Image (tube, grey):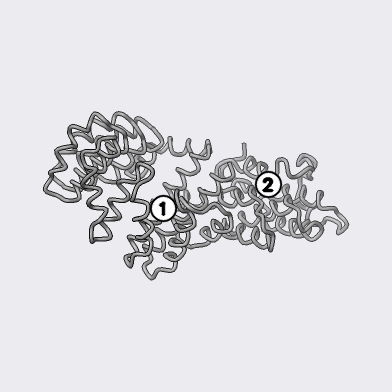
Amino acid sequence: MVPADSKAARICPWRAPVRCALALVLGILAVPLSAAPASTQSGRDAPKAAGPERLLAQGWAALAEGEAAAASALAAKALALAPASVAAAGLAVEAEIARGGPEAGLAVYERWLGGRRVDAAYLLRRVATAYLASAVRQRDGALARVEALKALVADGDPDARASLAAAGPTGVLEARLLASLGDETAVRTLIAQLQSIPDKRGTIDALVESGSPLARGPLMEMLGDIRDEHRAAAADALGRLGAREAIDRIKPMLEDGSFPVRMTAARALYQLGDDSGATLLDQLLLSEHAAVRMGAAEALSVRPGGAWLSVARALADDPDQSVQLQAARLLAPYDRELAERVLTRLRQSENPAVREEAGKVLAERVANDFATLRRLLRSGEPVTAVRAAARILELTR
């Protein structure tokens, strides 16, 4: 194992530098790295006649010694001899990530890709992993960091899971992430927090993601919360959890004094297979207010078919960009082309929050092509880039 403070450790974005470097070239580079010289000096003085295989072996040896500039130069020589070589491009990408971070790795990958119409999926995967690892190291973007950790854990990265487990549910975001991954201790931590934190909605969402039956009792208690938004969030969560035992507790909420609570109760019941609120949802689907029609369409979408789909398509052109965004998110599984068109348009919005949310939805729910995901990696928006990287990992598993 390479010490964490060694030069070799600094060339890899995660905690296993040698494994990280070698994994990229397994099955690509035919020359065994054990044949590479122990010193990078012979790499720097390599004769011009050296073939690409020897140059690559020397380049990986240089990279293992922390000599990223030498490795980059050797990769360039190998590419001059074999421009289409995936192995040489892999070394170039790895060297540039070590020198300048994931953005530099993406830049050299795209230069190598040039006009090719088909991406080298596993080279792009390496770039995506570097983006996620970089986000994990950042301390000024908590949401991007947590999303990156979640993506790495979902991809089976043992170091990411070990790092998360070692930290434990010390903060709200970390506890929510652990709970969403099914960690029972974190679930219990969040349940305890429900009584003390002022805004409970993010914690409720994490409990839903956990799928833990432990969450059902505390959420049922919250149906009587004094705050409208908490009653609504609890009803919605119980619907998403499939908690049919909550039906009798939710039904009276159809008469609640708060319209959002009534609407959410109808949605939760509909999701649980109870049609007590279906008439209300059908009426709201005809509302004069676009946001209300959108909410009703979203509530009814838990069952396939019906009028909600045509309503959502119509709302994709609503003047309100937030309604367009909701419509695109809802339409993504049913009309990918329309959803992509709406989200691409919203990416040009003057509102930065709309632009970023559109990028996140595009990366997470719509984009299936690497060209779009590469563009989102370059967005400059941390959470959008993280979700694009996570999507690349998902597509290349």
Up-down: is 210 above or below 88?
above
- Mark 2 secondary-structure assignment: helix
Query: Which residue lies at the image location 23% right of the left edge and 52% below the top edge?
Result: 284
Which image quarter is the N terminus in?
A: top right
Judge whether residue 379 can be spotted in this image: yes
Q: Which residue is more in the foreground, 166 or 254? A: 254
Q: Which residue is more in the foreground, 239 or 216? A: 239
State the residue lying farthest toward the front.
306
Q: Residues within 10 Å of mark 2 (few under 14, many from 20)?
A: many
- Mark 1 secondary-structure assignment: helix
The quadrant holding residue 192 is: top left
State the residue lying farthest toward the right.
49
The quadrant holding residue 351 is: bottom left
Q: Residues within 10 Å of mark 1 (few under 14, many from 20)?
A: many
Amino acid type indicated by mark 1: Leu
Query: Which residue lies at the image location 35% right of the left edge and 33% below the top edge?
Result: 211
Look at mark 2 in the image and give the residue it sits on: 64
Residue 45 is tagged as none
Image coords of residue 243 (percent x, y): 28, 32
Up-down: is 280 above or below 288?
above
Look at mark 1 in the image and give the residue it sits on: 331
Up-down: is 338 above or below 253?
below
| Left or right of residue 297: residue 96 | right
Amino acid type indicated by mark 2: Ala
**Going from the N terminus, do you reach mark 1 or mark 2 first?**
2
Image coords of residue 181 (percent x, y): 41, 36
Image coords of residue 257 (percent x, y): 11, 48
State how many labels appear: 2
Judge whether residue 142 can be spotted in this image: no
| Left or right of residue 370: residue 213 | left
Image coords of residue 40 (percent x, y): 75, 51
| Left or right of residue 183: residue 344 | right
